[in-house]
Amino acid sequence: MPAKLSTHVLDLTTGSPAVGMEIELWSLTETPVQLKVVTTNADGRTDGPLLTGADLRAGDYQLVFKIRDYFATRGVNATFFVYAAVFFRVEDPNASYHVPLLVTPWAYSTYRGS
């Protein structure tokens, strides 16, 4: 299986995938560069991996999950968090990295998934 970077988001207020959340992917290895802006689909995932193969390089990255915008589209305007900015390092570009987000208007959690 080729190496890849992926993510998905679960809305813990409903116990379902977070459909329509915008996510930015940034490379932070040298000067910060925005690599992609994607939106989660019906499964709370992106339609494809964020990075694959030679595009997945060793270095530092950031995923920015737009929490306030997501909940505002669902009529929830009182959110504590505006964004979840997750900083992580790719040490082995031949491995796969999965960064899920569990989210509510008042809390979020993330981890390195499989």
Image (cartoon, rainbow, N blue to C red):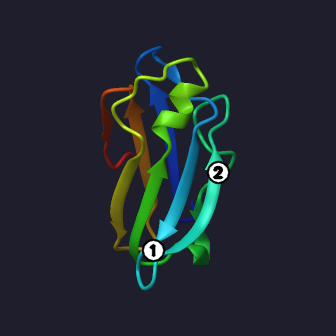
The image quarter containing residue 63 is: bottom left
* Residue placed most toward the observer, 78 or 88: 78
Query: Where's residue 43, x and y in %?
Result: 61, 30
Judging by the rendered image, the residue that carries numbered circle 2 is: 38
Relative to 109, 37 lies left or right: right
Quarter of the image for the N terminus: give it.
bottom right
| Quadrant in which residue 86 is drawn | bottom left
Q: Which residue is drawn at 51% across and 26% down?
A: 71
Amino acid type indicated by mark 1: Pro
Q: Which numbered mark, 2 or 1, is in the foreground of this view?
A: 2
Q: How far apart are marks 2 and 1 (CA)?
A: 21 Å
Query: Could you say whether the residue bearing mark 2 is in a helix, strand or loop?
Result: strand
Of the residues shown, which amino acid type is indicated by label 2?
Val
Q: x, y (%) of residue 72? A: 55, 27
Q: Residue 42 carries which label?
A: none
Q: Earlier in the sequence, mark 2 or mark 1?
A: 2
19 left or right, relative to 91: right
Q: What residue did someone put label 1 on? A: 93
- The residue located at (40%, 21%) in the rendering is 12
Write the residue at 42% across / 49% down.
99
Q: Which residue is drawn at 63% across and 45% down?
A: 46
Res 102 → quadrant? top left
Dot 1: few (<14), some (14–19), or many (≥20) neighbours within 10 Å?
Answer: some
